[in-house]
Image: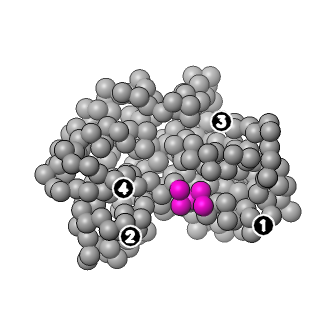
Amino acid sequence: MADKRAPIGVFDSGVGGISTLRTLAKVLPNEDFVFYGDSANAPYGEKDADTVCQLASQVIDHLATRDIKAMVIACNTATSAAKPQLIAQYPELPILGIEPALKEAVDAGKQDILVMGTPLTLSLPKYQAQLAKFGARTNIYTLPCPGLADRIELGQAGLPQIKALLANLMAPMLEHPIDAVVLGCTHYPFIQDLITAKFSQPVAIYTGYEGIARNLTAQLQQRDLLRSENPDRQIQFMSSRDTPAELTLYQALFDHGIQE
């Protein structure tokens, strides 16, 4: 039986999942979290699905040694490529995954939706099924963003490279009447202000973070694992690139994000 006082594990291929963690920590203020970024192998989104499964399995094996009570895959690519295998590997552990929030944008009545993601996430059956389902009633523009997550891994120091690549990637999209942008990679919310600034018209941003936070809360309530108080709440950062500089970057991104 899981301990109510155990932490919640959150992992990503690198720093991107810290943007998810920020929402989870806000919605669940009495929970401890341990975040693991596989920055030594980032980004996952430009690897093949089998490699992503293997890497994700190694990470969850490592986090399981911390006696976590739930696991959040804060990586769109790992969710799409590895979530079923991870659930089979740990059937007693609640495992939730982040996914492109295309349904949220469609349900909100948006008509011209840009979906940004890694090449692998956008090529896998999960997203392709969403595209087929919703594409008949909305205009959906799919934009693979190779290299973008890699540059965001640099944090504030990568800002000039991020801006240059973003301008190149988004140029073909600016001719369309986009009214919503789905950020299909957890790295991208760190630069959502840069993305929205590219458009002359207002655009709504969808990440799926509020949905996964609600789902996580419900899962913990169902298992009587939700903490009602925790005056000494702890959020711990771990990385496969285990250096002081990397862990300092994680903390800075959690505290401040990337600022222009």
Query: What residue is shown at x 29% (from left), y 43% (from top)?
Result: 196
Q: Give the alpha-carbon distance from disc 3 to disc 4, as whole Å.
A: 27 Å
Which mark's residue is nearer the viewer, 2 or 4? 2
Asked if the residue at tag 3 contacts the one at tag 1, i.e. Cβ–Cβ closer than 8 Å, the answer is no
Q: In this view, does 149 lie above or below 74?
A: above
Q: Can residue 41 be seen in this view?
A: no
Label 2 environment density (alpha carbons within 10 Å; few <14, some 14–19, many ≥20):
few
6 on left or right of 155: right
Asked if the residue at tag 2 contacts the one at tag 3, i.e. Cβ–Cβ closer than 8 Å, the answer is no
Q: Residue type at mark 3: give it.
A: Phe
Q: Give the alpha-carbon distance from disc 3 to disc 2, as whole Å.
A: 35 Å
Query: What residue is shown at x 27% (from left), y 39% (from top)?
Result: 197
x%, y% of residue 187?
44, 43
Pick whichever of labels 3 and 4 is earlier in the sequence. Answer: 4
The secondary structure that most of the magenta stretch takes on is: helix
At numbered mark 3, what does the secondary structure look like: helix, strand or loop? strand
217 part of magenta stretch: no
Q: Residue type at mark 2: give it.
A: Asp
Q: Give the alpha-carbon distance from disc 1 to disc 4, as whole Å.
A: 31 Å
Q: Which mark is residue 182?
A: 4
Query: What residue is shown at x 51% (from left), y 54% (from top)?
Result: 209
The residue wearing badge 1 is 223
